[in-house]
Image (cartoon, helix red, strand yellow):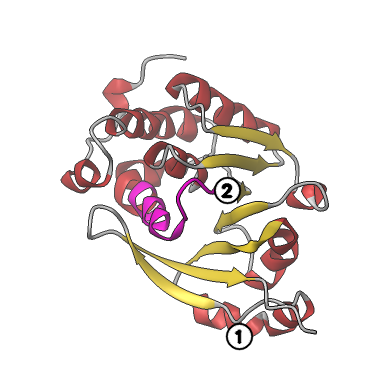
Amino acid sequence: MADVSRETPYAPELARRAFSSERLPLAERYVGLLASHGVERGLVGPREAPRLWERHVLNCLALSSVVPSTATVADLGSGAGLPGLVLAIGRPDLRITLVEPLQRRVTFLDEVIGTLSLDNVVTVRGRAEELHGRETYDVVTARALAPLGRLLTWAMPLVASHGALLAMKGSTAADEVAAAGAQLRKLRCATPEVLTVIGPDGSSTATVVRVAHGQPHG
């Protein structure tokens, strides 16, 4: 792939606090790829390029604070790798599967994985439903993929009995939980938690809806 270092948005001090010295160069390279190839291929809007660190990467890394050590993670509708690739870079202890149906996005994800030599992440081209009955994960993540009610039907069959869905949401999180009541009952989920999580930089935050399976009766 072409060198894009000259196009990489400068890593802010928060990024230097968020990533270890070993992983920061990988994060910088990823942001450079997002700002160049990601924009060129329509995976990232051109207006987003200057704020990739604060609005996207550090926001996604905040999710890592509620992901257990050595967990298996499925990132649904991974797109340009947010949050899946960010977690793979920031948390090399995790084993991550990026689930994405569109080939052009999978191609980009595979190129990033190869360029950064990430050995803890793989891609699966397909929809979440295609994995139902075949795979389960400790954690299932999604960011801006679908309203919570619809997301539950895709995600919860992939969540291990001890695991959880971590859905990254914005200010509508509580409203989405309320609107998803029927699906939560149908899928026998535990009461969702709306969490404000803080990233390893100590400042960046994200709003996350955590949904686990309910306790079996009888």
Which amino acid type is marked by label 1?
Ala
Label 1, label 2: how far apart the Cα atoms are:
26 Å
The outermost residue toward the left is: 13
Q: Residues within 10 Å of mark 1 (few under 14, many from 20)?
A: few
Sequence-earlier tag: 1 or 2? 2
User: Magenta stretch mostly in which secondary structure?
Assistant: helix
Confirm whether the magenta stretch covers residue 72.
Answer: no
Q: Quadrant of the C terminus?
A: bottom right
Amino acid under disc 2: Val
Please indicate whether residue 16 sits to the left or right of residue 49 in the image: left
Q: Position of residue 76 (x, y in %)?
A: 63, 50
The outermost residue toward the top is 2
Image quadrant in which you'd find residue 89: top left
Marks 1 and 2 close (CB-CB < 8 Å) = no
Residue 197 visible, this angle? yes
Residue span colored magenta: 57-71
> Residue 50: x, y in percent?
30, 43
Q: Which residue in the structure is indicated by mark 1?
A: 178
Kindly identify the residue that appears in the image at 56 percent across and 31 percent down. Answer: 109
Q: Nearer the viewer, mark 1 or mark 2?
A: 2
Q: Quadrant of residue 103?
A: top right
Whether 161 is drawn above or below 129: the answer is: below
Residue 67 appears left or right of 186:
left
Residue labelled with disc 2: 73
Q: For the point 46% across and 21% down, which residue is it?
A: 117
Q: Secondary structure at mark 1?
A: helix
Q: Secondary structure at mark 2?
A: strand
Please tell me whether residue 156 is drawn above or below residue 116 in the rendered image.
below
